[in-house]
Amino acid sequence: MAVILDGNALAANIKQKIKADLEGLGIVPGLAVVIVGDDAASHVYVNHKKKDCAQCGIKSETFELPADTGQDKLMELIHELNSRDDIHGILVQLPLPKGYDEQAVIQAISPKKDVDAFHMENIGRVLDGNFTFAPCTPYGVMRLLEHHGIDPAGKHCVVVGRSNIVGKPMAMLLLHKHATVTICHSRTKDLAEMTRKADILVAAVGKIGLITADMVKPGAVVIDVAINRGDDGKLYGDVDYAPVAEIASYITPVPGGVGPMTRAILMENTIIAAKMAMGK
Ligand code: GUN
């Protein structure tokens, strides 16, 4: 039976440390959270982030804009937030509604305030390995592995999914830790053949039941990044949890695995940004 990689516990630990650190320094970082439109899941995520900020001693300011706000107004807001001294981090919740140029918005965020690490400058730094901010979800996975003494060096890591937010940066971060990395995606010919070779398997697709037990090598570490809502209203990852937990050595639950880690790293990135801005 696999050991559960408890993201809630580690995230709580990280947030406590942040709170103590901020109290010691006597600073209150500011995070602007921008959400456009009424996507229900995005609003849930944003509310979680606001709660995390309150727990850490970070001042969050939420901008809830209607879907018809328009690109120009959104860009204006980004420019205003870039220039505000009391805002150290800017997060635009993705996806934006149809009709927006998402890349233009992301690239307009000052790289120094880009706590998601989605700006080209920060992506480049992640590729290079010498980064200030790493994208929250993949870096949260790295921290979860590290906390449990799981060293990717020399291991075969298979990442399923090639998004800019998770799959691609995940592969880079694992590579920096000396893993052999395979990235699989929708055009991969025999997915099961690939995933069975994984010592560490990261699923980041968004498809319930994608990774079944026959696709997992016994003893593998299984990381489930996805958050899917089932027809029953419950949350599921990509991994067929119960049968895979029987054979894996470690596994992340959904919910309570990677999700809370993503948000804990967002908090960390925000204090990194604030400290840089304040010269601390
Ligand atoms: N949508 C899904 N994940 C993320 C994330 O990590 N950051 C932002 N801004 N939007 C998201």
Image (cartoon, rainbow, N blue to C red):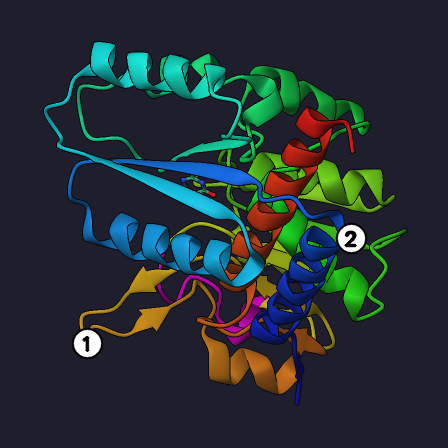
| Residue at 36% over, 57% down | 207
**Residue 126 included in the magenta stretch of the image:** no
Q: Position of residue 83 (x, y in %)?
A: 47, 14
For ligand 1, give the image quadrant.
top left
Q: Answer left or right for 65 relative to 210.
A: left
| Residue at 69% over, 38% down | 272
Residue, far bottom: 1
Q: Is residue 248 above or below residue 276?
A: below
Q: Quadrant of the C terminus?
A: top right
**Which mark is on residue 21?**
none
Estimate how packed mark 1 is, as few (under 14), some (14 to 19) or many (20 or more) residues with alpha carbons within 10 Å: few
| Residue at 65% over, 56% down | 141
Q: Nearer the viewer, mark 2 or mark 1?
A: 1
Can residue 112 be seen here?
Answer: yes
**Which mark is on residue 232?**
1
Residue nearest the viewer, comparing 207 with 70: 70
Residue, far front: 26
Residue type highlighted by circle 1? Asp
**Which mark is on residue 156?**
2
- Which segment did they paint magenta? 207-215
Q: Position of residue 44 (x, y in %)?
A: 29, 57
- How many circles with numbers are drawn on the protein? 2
| Residue at 31% over, 13% down | 75
